[in-house]
Image (cartoon, rainbow, N blue to C red):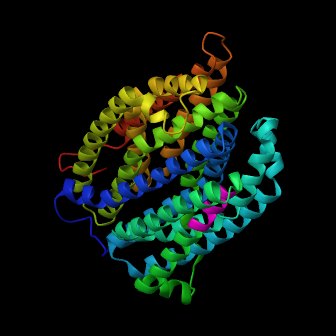
Amino acid sequence: MNRQDLTTGPVFSTMSLFALPMILGNILQQGYNIADTWVVGHMIGPDALAAVGSAFALMTFLTSVLIGLCMGSGTVFSLCFGRQDRQQLKSSICASFFLLAAIAALLTAVSVLCVDAMLVWMNIPKEIAAMTRGYLIVVFWGIPAIAAYNFFGAYLKAIGNSVAPLIFLGISTVCNILLDVLFVAVFQWGTLGAASATIISQYLSGIGIGIYVLVKEGEVRSALLHVHVKTSDFKEIANYSVLTCMQQSVMNLGILMVQGLVNSFGTAVMAAFAAAVKIEAFTYMPAQEYANAFSTFIAQNMGAGQKRRVVKGVRYAVATVVIYCLLASLLIWIFARPFLLIFIKSTQKAILAEGIRYLRIVGPFYFGIGCLFLFYGFYRAIGKPAMSVVLTVISLGTRVLLAYMLSAVKTFGAAGIWWSIPIGWILADLTGYVYYLCRVHFDESRKII
């Protein structure tokens, strides 16, 4: 669990070994999501599965602001670490921490107060509205814990320590699964039991990683005990974080709008979508974590002026992610039905059929989202986060527009929503690649101009 300098050593192995704990952490997280969905779907029922699926989409949107801020801050931390500028690193830590704490407190308060308006906005069916509301009221109080885990995790990853966040996530995941079974299966608390298990585990990981960092990392301890922040520190954090927050928020707003459209098709389609998305996340999200590791690699090497390594890193990352995504697509195509049976009973034929249709339409195009994750990480690391926002707007704007247009056509129905997803990915990829060719040039010395 030591710091890892990503500016030295073989490019592929250095980047991949750094990414491995992050990927394992993602697998743990998705493993929890699958266990949670299985417990809710099998031990409570399809209505509960639909309610929790919609709540998950809303929470992802709300916390995207915090995660975007942490991702942007992590880029600043990586640049400072690559330059070996310890004083600026401490100032950036302090500015980011207090900004994040204020936003987390505000977001929690607004979410709790506006929950009823959110239910209306999301087109939650009346038969599951009370269940969804109760679940949300509980999980909203976990927002500060999410902020804490992502802040301290972003710092550790920025300085090359991707193992410690994995350990705390692993502890949280095991705790969550055990509490899910206890609260839902044994105590029979329903969706409130699943929500309680979630926030207890979130606080366990958030507080645990915070204590670890304060004990082990002198820069963080010094930054938070001896507060000294300049206006310029907030500006630097904002330059990287505001646009990253926008990118995350736009992305998840689009997803939430699609969720609202899915909800209009009734609980059967909602349940199918909730189950299929869990499988999908488990399948392609390792590519997202690899892209996040790639972003840290690029940022450290940019800070250190190692631009030859940046070029090599881009090549290795693209090849790795594309190959992985193609294999994942093949796996989903073959095993779509058995995977869905993890969450859906074989007697629920309409839900099962819709879930299979979703995975067979979207699954072959996972390379599109994999490359898009790389573009996000790359442009964030080289100081062009605005381009990540542009790509997100193209991807999600296309998805939302086409989803509403195609789903209104009787021939398509819900399948129109599914087809809009890969089309949005591919259009964004093409835009990112054209911008890369036109604006991010390499001279004969392999230096980014």
Magenta-tinted stretch: 193-201
Residue 250 shows in the view: no
**Residue 46 located left or right of residue 206:** right
Query: Viewer-proximal residue, 118 or 174?
Result: 174
Residue farthest toward the bottom in the current orientation of the protein: 226
Which residue corresponds to the image point at 83% horizontal and 46% vertical from the top-left? 117
Q: Is residue 48 above or below residue 182?
A: above
The answer to which of 103 and 38 lies nearer the viewer is 38
Judge whether 52 appears above or below 423 on screen.
Answer: below
Is 126 above or below relative to 77?
above
Q: Where does residue 331 sit, x and y in percent of width and height? A: 34, 32
**Residue placed most toward the observer, 3 or 353:** 353
Q: How many marks?
A: 0
Can residue 288 be seen by looking at this rendering?
yes
Quarter occupied by residue 306: bottom left
Q: What kind of secondary structure does the magenta stretch mostly adopt?
A: helix
Please report the residue visible at 66 percent of the width from the left and 39 percent of the height from the top: 50
The N terminus: image quadrant:
bottom left
Q: Is residue 199 magenta?
A: yes
Q: Is residue 54 magenta?
A: no
Q: Position of residue 296 (x, y in %)?
A: 36, 60
Q: Is residue 51 above or below residue 149?
A: above
Q: Residue 197: give x, y in percent of width and height.
A: 61, 62
Q: Quadrant of residue 283?
A: top left
What is the x, y in percent for residue 90? Answer: 47, 80
In this view, the residue farthest toward the front is 186
Q: Residue at x 35, y 51 (%)?
A: 290
- Residue 397 sits in quarter: top right
Q: Is residue 356 left or right of residue 327?
A: right
Q: Residue furthest top?
A: 411
